[in-house]
Image (tube, rainbow, N blue to C red):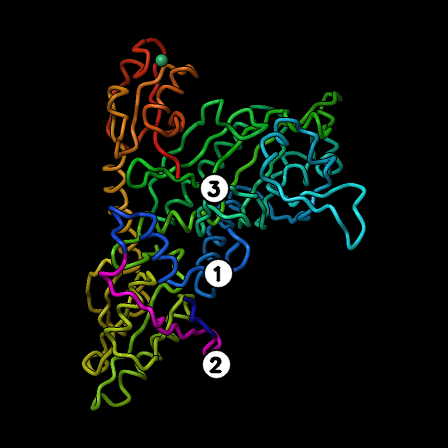
Amino acid sequence: MVRAGPRGRDAPSMLILRPPPSARRMADLPDKRTAFIDWYLAVVEAAELSDKRYPVKGMNVWTTYGFRARRNLDAVMIREIEASGSEAVEFPTLIPANEFAKEKDHIKGFDNEVYWVTKGGASSLDVPLVLRPTSETAMYPVFADWIRSHRDLPLNVYQIVNTFRYETKTTRPFVRVREIHFFEEHTCQVDEAHATERVRSNLDAFRRMAEAFCLPYLSLRRPDWDKFAGAHYTIAFDIPLADARTLQLGSVHHYRENFSRPYGIRYEAADGSQRYVHQTTFGLSERLIGAILAVHGDQKGAVFPSAIAPYEVVIVPILGVDSGPGPSDAARSAAERLRRVGRRAFLDTGDERPGAKYYRWELHGAPLRLEIGRREAESRTATAVDRLGRKSPVAFDRLEAEVAERLADFDRALLERARAAFAAAVTVAGSLEELTGSSTVRVVGWCGSEECGHRIERAIDGALLGTPEDPLPVKVGEPTGCIACRQSEGIRWAIAGRPL
Ligand SMILES: [Zn+2]
């Protein structure tokens, strides 16, 4: 239940997060290992990140606390994509049906997923409109106007907007929704090689984003039968979860001329000839918040890396009958100093016991807590406790620097913990039999044929997710044979799992 609200006029940047009446005790969260989905849903609700009571399925309300996480996620995406030479734009939400239909594979790919707008007021529209499921078909007719000459290239633009897909599977907050908070980059390049380079640049940008999220992941070239509708090829990012399940975090597509031809996006080359641009796209979404919760969360609740945490530091004054004004003053001063250097700091002045506050902020995933009681106020040293339970003193004189160190150290430890879980969740399989009922994501030798691919998919009751673009983050030698046909020519490693 969401109880977050503004605190009052004197402190507009602070929130009071009251414990919900149904506040679960630590032991009450379902077991993450044995009941993952139940655990995930309980954490999203208990940490007050999303309100799913909105009367349209799959369209959830971003609460104040969840919105802070989303804004931080956006900031990381914006920072990295702009560093790679992309600029923000924003295109309209509605797409005319005739533009939407121009690339045949693309329209086919979205046949059962789009929402239609067919009426304006009481009258039927001459040209029905599509609520964008993604923005290729909104942007590309306009790109054709923008691009005339090789001097207009490359065109690298992105937008962060809501997109809509009529999801028929069970919806889950952040992970499978019908109104998607979507990051999409669209680029036009002079030729195929430059488009390939843009794909590499996107992979680098995502690597830097994932560092901020402390998330180890797999970068996989999807098999042809599973690539994005209209793409020449697709590279997707996946993370392993319990029980051989995987979650796709986002993807990068090389379109070649598949869209520029139907949309007429041409330019005059230096030699005077007319050529079609080669295009790429890069898509991410709030699913990253779901991934961060799924990977880092534990039996105490959510765990946020500092870059995404709604509040990086929570300051809890400990007041007793004889504590005097010391702890309150010191806590207030610490909050002010941290905010002045740009830290997202929350001063928890609520009247509950300190223990109840610790419990709540662990549930909400705050990376660092500073406890300030009478002893701390007198010695001018706060007690810092990070979300992994590690305690250390922080001198008031070096507050800003020491908090920065603790947060960096926390992120490192979080990444290490995630890497250990990742290594345990991705293992090599030597035969199709090993795939049946597998509890880990499997690395398998694959000859590249579609037939063998489908045999692998049937054996694991999931999908062949693709071939790794980067060295595998688990120790494997060279593949010796295809796990399905046993042939030993042209074998590559592939990843098989059960997409969530
Ligand atoms: Zn084979």
Looking at the picture, tell me which residue is in the foreground, 470 or 67.
Answer: 67
Residue 173 horizontal side relative to residue 375, left or right: right
The rendered magenta stretch, by its main secondary structure, is classed as loop
Q: Nearer the viewer, mark 2 or mark 3?
A: 3
Please name the amino acid that badge 2 sits on.
Answer: Gly
Q: What residue do we see at 27% from left, 74% from top?
A: 396
Q: Which residue is mark 3?
A: 169
Cα gap from disc 1 to disc 3, whole angstroms:
18 Å
Q: Could you tell which of marks 2 and 1 lies nearer the N-terminus? A: 2
Front residue of 260/362: it is 362
To which quarter of the image does residue 267 belong? top right
Which quadrant of the picture is home to ligand 1?
top left
Question: Mark 2 — residue?
Answer: 8
Residue 61 position in % (x across, y down)? 51, 60
Image quadrant holding the C terminus, namely top left
Tell me the element at label 1.
loop
Total numbered labels? 3
